[in-house]
Amino acid sequence: MAKKTTCGCALNVLIIVTVVFFALIVVSFIGGNIGATILGGEPLGFLNVGVPEYHPAPEAPFHGLPITNTMLTVWLSVLVLFGLFFAGTRKMKLVPKGLQNLLEMIVEAAANFIEDPAGKKHGRWFFPVCTTIFLFVITNAWLSLVPGFETITVNGEPLLRNANTDLNVPAALAVVSFCACEYWGFKAKGASYLKTFFNFGPLGRAIKQLFTGKIKAGLSGLLDGVMAIFAGILEILSHLIRMVSFTFRLFGNMTAGMILVMIMLFLVPWVLPSVFYGLEAFFGFVQAMIFAGLTLGFACAAVMSEE
Amino acid sequence: MDASVWPEVAKVIGAGLAMGLGALGPGIGIGILGMGAMNALGRNPEARGPIMTNMILAIAFAEAVAIYALVVAILLIFVA
């Protein structure tokens, strides 16, 4: 007779695991900083994590070298991505197996995701930039969950730190995405793409109508013309503000995650932070998808014809 | 209380207000989004996958506003 199992292990093992789990939570709750505050006195020695410190600016761990720790992480994630794809595509087979299969799955999913709204022709334009942004952001986010990040120190400063928590990295990505969108707009529509921003056509037509005697049509056209110019100004502003919102969305989400994990570690040092760790992994994926997806959306809006 | 701590006090109060008020709108927005998703799910349980994906995307947008507030709060406390 087979043993009765729940959640993949025998019932008594499950009970033991659960009890240990809750015991750990209770001990860390009472012995940690929350318990110390409620009951008075000091937290237990091995549970005393120390007040979390947050520095908005990245640190430069090497004296005299202007290389910050986020920069090192960016290089590391580039290396990781390069190594992964190099290893996966070195001996390509017709029937993919293992790593090659995984990479093909990722690339195929990205291609489908992009070609769905953009169509075949434009999808081929957008695919490199959008997929690179996605892979880069997600690699940065997930690499920072590897133990050793922010805890290995050189000269008292952490050697590696999540690159997305440095404002410069999201800002650079946002500028890349902005430039790419404008480039695609010009590529798809030529010089008439400028009409999105500087639309003097309706106003000119209205003035012409005024001077050729169609007073009534001209006057109502005048309003439309002014509106069109104003809409163009708004369009310019929205394109510029887009960069700021891109930057702060990624930076804020990643920084918030970092601070959240730090504070949970401070309050309840055991078990509970792992929940937020999982949440961080999920948010890394979501933010990467949003960055790439928004770039895709704006690119689609840029190449879409008005008529 | 001597006057030299007032900037510090203002910083803390400002950061708290920024975060608290800034989380208000996104909270309501995420609630409405969840409601919409649940309604859609109730009407059409087969479309679970797309509804889920779009809901998470839209939630991330609403959440971004709260994140801006958080950035302001962080700047107030750590930088200003």
Image: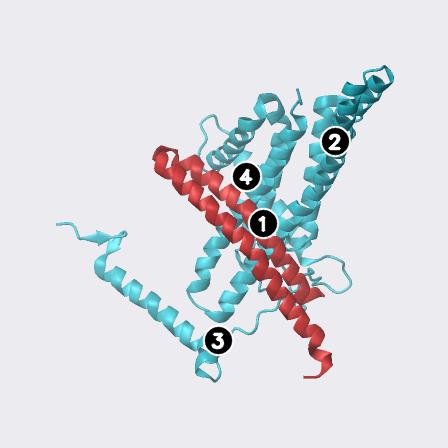
User: On what subunit does the disc labeled 2 rest?
Assistant: A
In this figure, which residue is indicated by the disc labeled 3?
Answer: A33
Q: Position of residue A126 (x, y in %)?
A: 63, 30
- How far apart are the alpha carbons under marks 1 and 3? 31 Å
Q: Nearer the viewer, mark 4 or mark 1?
A: 1
In this figure, which residue is indicated by the disc labeled 2?
Answer: A227
Position of residue A26 in the picture relative to residue B74 (left or right): left
Q: Nearer the viewer, mark 2 or mark 4?
A: 2
Q: Are marks 2 and 4 on the same chain?
A: yes
Q: Secondary structure under badge 4?
A: helix
Please say whether residue A156 is visible from this viewpoint. Answer: no
**Location of residue A166 with respect to A134 vertically, above or below:** below
- How far apart are the alpha carbons under marks 2 and 1? 30 Å
The mark found on residue A198 in the picture is none
User: On what subunit does the disc labeled 4 rest?
Assistant: A
Q: Secondary structure under badge 2?
A: helix
Identify residue type, mark 4. Ala
Identify residue type, mark 2. Met
Instruction: Tell me whether the residue at label 3 lies in contact with that at label 2, contact meaning CB atoms closer than 8 angstroms.
Output: no
Q: Nearer the viewer, residue A286 or A238?
A: A238
- How far apart are the alpha carbons under marks 2 and 4? 56 Å
User: On what subunit does the disc labeled 1 rest?
Assistant: B
Rendered cyan, the chain in question is: A
The mark nearer the N terminus, 3 or 4, is 3
Residue at the image point whose x is 70% and y is 44% from the top: A241
Identify residue type, mark 3. Asn
Instruction: Tell me whether the residue at label 2 lies in contact with that at label 4, contact meaning CB atoms closer than 8 angstroms.
Output: no
In this figure, which residue is indicated by the disc labeled 1?
Answer: B64
Q: Nearer the viewer, mark 1 or mark 3?
A: 1
Rendered red, the chain in question is: B
